Amino acid sequence: MRRLLLLALLGGGLLLVARGLLAPSLVRPQLILVLGGDIDREKLAGRLAHRDGLPLLVSGGSNPEYAQWLFSQEGLDRRQFRLDYRARDTLGNFTTVVDDLRRRGIRHVLLVTSSDHMDRALLVGRIVAGSRGIRLTPVPVSCGDRCLPEGRRKVWGDGLRAAAWVVTGRDLRAWAAEQMGPSPGTAGPDRGAR
């Protein structure tokens, strides 16, 4: 019975965090974080950065040459954007940058990603960034007829990975791969899926 109550409380807490109902922010957005994977995301983020004068951080985006050209076309100075290619998946989009953002005093971020990816990105991001006192405001990019809705299992699975990262400082997927070794037919543990 205690275990069930604890799971219910944990699930309820994750739901509140994921929906942004805890710790409302009065701080204006200080940075735009765009999750790579679609050029339309970078285009919208570049327009927002130019319009609002905010710095822009791209996690796992298009190649550097294209991104630099695109952002220069949007009128951004090279010092206004940063390209970060450490992330291998949605969890990594947050875990690789969140401590840097906290050190810089960032407390409120505009999160740019595709509308069909936003639920998972917000759940993961609000858990990881929320653990560092950083609030996320979603800016969904329409994916139109290219939308591929993500299943609840994938969304909540990544949410649990995010919660485990906050508690342990490690990604459960990477830990499991280390414990089990590469699976047959793979080139090694670097074959992560987005």
Image: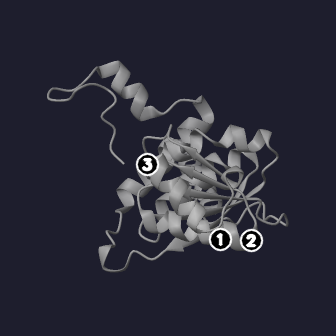
Q: Position of residue 177 (x, y in %)?
A: 34, 26
Q: Amino acid at mark 3?
A: Asn
Check contact, mark 3 vs mark 2: CB within 8 A. no
Q: Which residue is mark 2?
A: 52
Q: Position of residue 144 (x, y in %)?
A: 36, 80
On screen, 168 above or below 83?
above
On screen, 62 above or below 161?
below
In the picture, the disc for residue 98 is: none
Q: Amino acid at mark 2?
A: Asp
On screen, 160 above or below 191?
below
Residue under the point 27% across and 25% down = 188
Local SS, label 1: helix
Q: Residues within 10 Å of mark 2 (few under 14, many from 20)?
A: few
Q: Amino acid at mark 1?
A: Leu
Q: Which residue is mark 1?
A: 48
Local SS, label 3: loop
> In terms of sequence position, does the residue under pointer 3 or pointer 2 come before the other?
2
Extreme residue toward the right, this view: 26
On screen, 182 above or below 5?
above
Residue 2 can be seen, yes or no: no
Horizontal side of 175 relative to 134 (left or right) equals: left
Look at the image and name its color scheme. Answer: one colour
Residue 151 can be seen, yes or no: yes
Residue under the point 34% across and 69% down = 149
Check contact, mark 1 vs mark 2: CB within 8 A. yes
Distance from Cα at disc 3 to Cα at disc 2: 24 Å
Distance from Cα at disc 1 to Cα at disc 3: 20 Å
Local SS, label 2: helix
Extreme residue toward the bottom, this view: 144
Q: Which residue is mark 3?
A: 63
